[in-house]
Image (cartoon, rainbow, N blue to C red):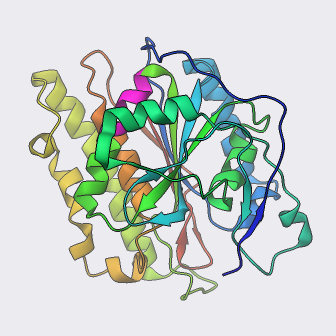
Amino acid sequence: MRVKILEVTFMTSATFSPLQNTSKPMPVLFIGHGSPMNAITQGVFSENLNALGERITQEYGKPKALLVISAHWITREFAMRAQDGAIPMIYDMYGFPQELYEVRYNAQGAQNLAMEIKEKLGEKVHIDNSWGLDHGAWSVLLHLYPKAEIPIIMASAPVGLSINEAFAIGRALAFLRAQGVCIIASGNVVHNLGDFSNAPKDYALRFDAFIKEAILHDCADSNAESNRESSAADSKDLSSAMQAILQSPKMADFKRAVPTLEHFYPLILALGAWHGSKNPNHARKVEVFNEEIALGSVSMTSYFLH
């Protein structure tokens, strides 16, 4: 894999005052990003993301910052970038039109906020400034927030962790939502680049449908439970549907749908961040969009978790 890093310049650095709770917690997004060409292609993918970015601003206000978890930053432990100034562009793909390598997204980093997260999570997170904005991030952000005016913290896909540990990291990040930070996880539920075809693979359809139904059932079950009694935020309070997702590596379709973990783990962190915010006055909601199996074995299915 060829990785090209371009340093970009920007005039100002992002500065933060201590985060304060907002009245309505920011949503969590899981975006199936698919091909890098989606960055420069106008269609359903770009239109849905553009509309979603506008909707978030209208309903929740402009995010103070974005925590972007990318499948293309692969680490053993959970890592974040903690540096002010322009974030370097990373072109971690090859064989595409030159136009794609000329894409720029001039986003600013957010060192103070990253260090605040580090202080709260402790050894659960490692600071690593060696990475930047890869195509898992910028192919989504170009459509979601095209002005690049919101500070960004890049975060990794921690494939060295167990699925339960990754979910716990997501839960630990949930406090950011009440403080105006939108969490965006970019990956794919099904991601098997070695099994492309013209028609969707049966295992891809089955596994994608299983995850969707489990998330929808979890949302309904969790809201019913919260109406009865608020429980502590640990694994014991998870619905059977969410437990099934965390047990999905045992499924027969998992190895073909998820041959490697880096595109699946952003979903797990996103679900953790969604679950980690317990508010009896705010019913958990989920909206599914961009439902499609591309190239036979890549799920574009995306989730608006709020």
Q: Quadrant of the N terminus?
A: bottom right
Q: Which residues are magenta?
A: 172-178
- Camera-nearest residue between 37 and 234: 234
- Camera-nearest residue between 15 and 37: 15
Q: Is residue 175 magenta?
A: yes
Q: Horizontal and vertical percent for residue 262?
A: 45, 68
Q: Is residue 163 magenta?
A: no
The main secondary structure of the magenta stretch is helix
Q: Quadrant of the C terminus?
A: top left
Q: Is residue 177 left or right of residue 89?
A: left
Please tell me which residue is depicted at 41% across the width and 34% down the height of the picture.
117
Q: Is residue 238 visible?
A: yes
Q: Is residue 268 left or right of residue 296?
A: left
Say above or below: 162 vs 144: below
Q: Is residue 216 visible?
A: no
Say above or below: 229 vs 74: above
- Camera-nearest residue between 134 and 245: 134
Q: Horizontal and vertical percent for residue 158?
A: 39, 61
Please tell me which residue is depicted at 36% across the width and 54% down the height of the picture.
268
Q: Horizontal and vertical percent for residue 177?
A: 43, 27
Please tell me which residue is depicted at 74% across the width and 42% down the height of the picture.
86
Please state the total of marks drawn on the protein image: 0
Q: Is residue 231 left or right of residue 179?
A: left
- Camera-nearest residue between 252 and 157: 157
Q: Horizontal and vertical percent for residue 7?
A: 80, 54
